[in-house]
Image (spheres, rainbow, N blue to C red):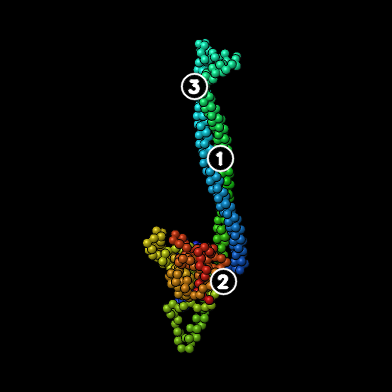
Amino acid sequence: MGTNTPARGSRWTAAGVLALVIGLGIGGTAAAVPPPPANPSDSEISSSQAQADAKAGEVGQLTNRLAEAEARLSDLQDQVELKMEEANKALVDQQTAQDAADQAQADADAARRESDAAAQQIETARAQLDAFIAGSYQQGSTIGSISAYLDSSSPRDLLARAQLLSSVSGSQLNALELMEQAQTDKSNKDAAARAALERARQKRAAAEQAKRTADAAQATAVQAQQNQAAQTAALESDRNAVEQQLYDAQQRVAGLQGQRQRYEDWVAQKQREEDEQARQAALAASKGSSGGGGGGSAQPVSGSASAIIERAIARAMSQLGMPYAWGGGNASGPTRGIHDGGVADYYGDYRKIGFDCSGLMIYAYGGAVALPHYSGYQYDVGRKVPLSQIRRGDLLFWGRSGIHHVALYLGNGMMIEAPESGMVVRVAPVRYGDILPYAARVVG
């Protein structure tokens, strides 16, 4: 049997008694059965179990609320991402509108400059034409004939006027008309450019407003997400606190049940001792001798399936708090771990005395069922039962793509296990993630 560490001695003082009782059951009557361990009453166990059940219900309620809060948080996170993208779109649209407004402003400025330049050219041409007409009149040139024609309707005057128009329209008047047309076109362009500028400014203003709206929506979504995250964190903290209370309550139940089991084991062992003494006495009487009884070889454990299962659970429970050590544990108790060249070595398992997951199962059923030191092979021992039919004493396994862990089912959704390097043997709620759909029933 393994020796309990000092750190665990204060919590599980009856473990040594149980070890001695079981040792006597295997080795004969070499020593007297020790005094009986504590036997908690049914009311103590029932009250402790009721407290654990109440805490389990509270954990369930908080878990449901937490699931709803996490779903809400996920939705809000999606909304934040959407609002962020909408803000990005508004930023791009704002920049595009700004670029268009800048270009429209440049086009309007250029059109205005062209219009102003055309107007200036027309004014210059008008001044030159006025000077030409005035000079011709003063010199009595054909321009004078125009003046005379204006007061006459004779054919001669008409011919003079025709000659003048032909002469002038071929030069200054024609040029003036062309400049006025150009000036009109440029004015039209100027007006169109200013209209385009106004539209661009309106689009820019709309884009800026859309950006402000998108930023505000994003800020609102982020705030809602942060508020929900705080509520979710608070709920998770509450649930963790109640889960710890549940764990403590379950540990109390397990402790009381363990005490009861140790007491019942003691009673059974005491009865076996008395039966053996009677048998030895009868044998001695029949042979006419004292007939010493103390064989030293180990004997297999016998009894009903339920007794073997309860013994296995009691043995496992006696190791609560024992360190995890990869490769550690056998039917006699904890052993030194071994090197794995990886995680176990990092935690120094090869320097520790303890159990790994399959080693704890070997010890629990030691003397009753021979189990190999590999969880994958342990899965093939006994018979398979679906999870919906599991009962106390069954072995649970994890690893749908390859078995990597085993634990002993205690009932009421709880199990005892040697979890992993850096941890200790513990009682915990059954984890259903990656659990195999069948358990192994090695007894019964």
Tag of residue 211: 1
Q: Is 54 on the left-hand or right-hand side of 316?
A: right
Query: In terms of secondary structure, where does tag 3 sit?
Result: loop
Name the amino acid, label 1: Lys
Tell me, yes or no, whether the two marked residues, 2 and 1, touch with CB atoms within 8 Å: no
Q: Earlier in the sequence, mark 3 or mark 1?
A: 3
Q: Is residue 443 visible?
A: yes
Q: Which residue is mark 3?
A: 171
Disc 1: CA contacts within 10 A as few (<14), some (14-19) or many (>=20): many
* Above/below status of 244 relative to 80: below
Residue 43: image x %, image y %? Answer: 62, 67
Q: Nearer the viewer, mark 3 or mark 2?
A: 3
Circle number at residue 389: 2
Q: Nearer the viewer, residue 327 or 170?
A: 170
Q: Is residue 353 left or right of residue 110?
A: left
Residue that appears at 57% across and 17% down: 155
